[in-house]
Amino acid sequence: MLADSTAYSGFAVDDTAAAAAFYRDTLGLTVEPVPGMEEHGLLALRLPGGAQVLVYPKPDFTPAAYTVLNFAVEDIDEAVDGLAARGVAFLRYPGFDQDGKGIARARGGGPSIAWFTDPAGNILSVLQEP
């Protein structure tokens, strides 16, 4: 029934202008207003590979308590260093063995991963597959 449909995900933020600046200027993504929805503040994040994510304002916004976007990278150290140079702070979680950069290194076949937040507090990550 939906096999031929186009799907995309979305998440809320409390300030779309701050979100647009972060995703565009800090992460280097293409950020565009959704045509016909400019007055409502809807944004489209254009991801590498052609995917799109909808970012929308929500007045009673609460940040997601889970990772809303994962960015697969070839070199996690390079990605973390580059983001840190742009002012991104990496999260630390109890129970995860994270190095000085905040990277939880791959163990047992999983990816190496480092988490950070957008200006609204939504959790994002960079990860490198083993």
Image (cartoon, helix red, strand yellow):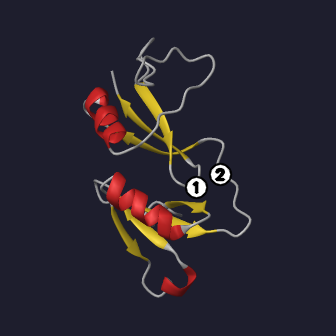
Residue 74 spot, x, y in % from top left: 25, 32
What SS does tag 1 mark? loop
Q: Is residue 51 visible?
A: no
- Whether tag 2 and tag 1 are in contact, CB under 8 A, the answer is yes
Residue farthest along the right direction in this orientation: 60
Residue 32 spot, x, y in % from top left: 37, 73
As displayed, is residue 9 above or below residue 16?
above
Residue sitting nearer the eye, 19 or 106: 19
As displayed, is residue 75 above or below residue 30?
above
Q: Is residue 36 visible?
A: yes
Q: How far, Cα to Cα, is label 2 from label 1? A: 6 Å
Task: Locate the C terminus and report the quarter of the image it occupies.
Answer: top left
Residue beneath the point at 42% across and 57% down: 22
How many labels sit on residues? Answer: 2
Residue 17 spot, x, y in % from top left: 48, 70
Residue beneath the point at 69% across and 61% down: 61
Give the amino acid at mark 2.
Pro
> Of label 2 and label 1, which has the lower sequence position?
2
Label 1 neighbour load within 10 Å: few <14, some 14-19, many 20+: some
Which disc, if any, is residue 63? 2
Residue 115 spot, x, y in % from top left: 49, 35
What SS does tag 2 mark? loop
- According to the image, label 1 marks what residue? 120
Specify the quadrant of the image occupied by residue 88.
Answer: top left
Label 2 neighbour load within 10 Å: few <14, some 14-19, many 20+: some
Residue beneath the point at 36% across and 37% down: 84
Give the amino acid at mark 1.
Ala
Residue beneath the point at 34% across and 33% down: 80
